[in-house]
Amino acid sequence: MTTGVIDPSARKTKWELREGDEIAPGRSALRRLGGGTRYEAYLAFDEHLHAIVVVKLIRPHLIEHAGALAGLASEVEILDGLDHPVIVRGFGHVLDGPRPHVVLEHLEGPRLSSLIRRYGPLPPEQLVPLATQLCSALHYLAAEEIVHLDVKPSNTIMSAPPRLIDLSVAMPLAAARALERSRGTDAFMAPEQCDPVALGPVGAAADVFGLGATLYMAATGERPFPDADHKSDDPVARWPQLDTDPNPVLLPSQVAAPVLACLQRSPVERPSPAELSDALEPVLGAQAKPRLSGLKPRWS
């Protein structure tokens, strides 16, 4: 069993599975979907479910890496404890053997990031219902004391309803509050995620910041903060959100105040998911939606 930090720049081995290859008994590969530093995802057929699923496998060179296995086990545990219509579901797992993996719900629909890249910003009549659905998911996660830590357009599937996916870096609130180094995707991380020791602790408000950055990009087609220098030792160069404010002019006036409230550098100045949903309700006009709470927003 190996340990140590996984180098994201290291060569990533692949499974090279072909259509029909067995991933595990009763699960066969259909096609590769993609992958990250630790994992590869395959579209697969599960005989027990008699359905198409997504199988997320630890990369071959990491199947004996303690950190990668612990991360997969943590994701499985979190998935097993969640049940919400806007959060991807898990349908089983194998944590040992030749191909450690988790089985995930297959969702029909593009990623929000793909839609923005292909068609540009979402109009308010599409943006606001999406925002309230994601608020519902984050409200639920906060109540369950789980912090997602990676809310972003590429982790939002535009199905019906939309789904928040990828809980690979999610963790219980107590663990998030104890973080001592950054965790998440640089461009969408709250300041306290960037530097937990100096600016923490990290909690549910970090997910609200990620949602705000996601909505800003969905509304404008651009990220809320300048491009970062990921190789720099200067925290501000790597994470411009530490001292840069987003440009409010680009946002549609109907959603500018709520979205910018999510992007406040101080966690206590951000709305809760329920407050954000309530603030966006007037924009929906005649469109009906369930209320998360009777709380009123703290900003005007």
Image (cartoon, helix red, strand yellow):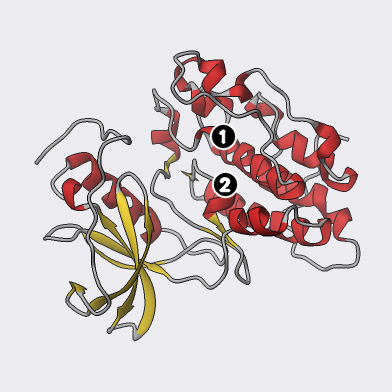
The answer to whether the residues at label 1 and label 2 have Cβ atoms under 8 Å apart is yes
Quadrant location, the N terminus: top left
Of residues 191 and 54, the one drawn nearer to the viewer in this rendering? 54
Of residues 246 and 268, the one drawn nearer to the viewer in this rendering? 246
Give the amino acid type for the residue marked by disc 2 in the picture. Lys
Residue at position x 61%, y 20% in the image: 242
Give the amino acid type for the residue marked by disc 1 in the picture. Ala
Secondary structure found at label 2: loop
Residue 189 at what x, y percent from top left? 55, 33
Q: Determine which residue is flagged by label 1.
A: 187
Report the Cα–Cα distance between label 1 and label 2: 9 Å
Residue 78 at what x, y percent from top left? 38, 53
Pointer 1 or 2: first along the chain: 2
Q: Quadrant of residue 265?
A: top right
Residue at position x 18%, y 53% in the image: 60
Decide: is 196 above or below 40: above
Decide: is 142 above or below 18: above
Q: Quadrant of residue 112?
A: bottom right
Q: Determine which residue is flagged by label 2.
A: 152
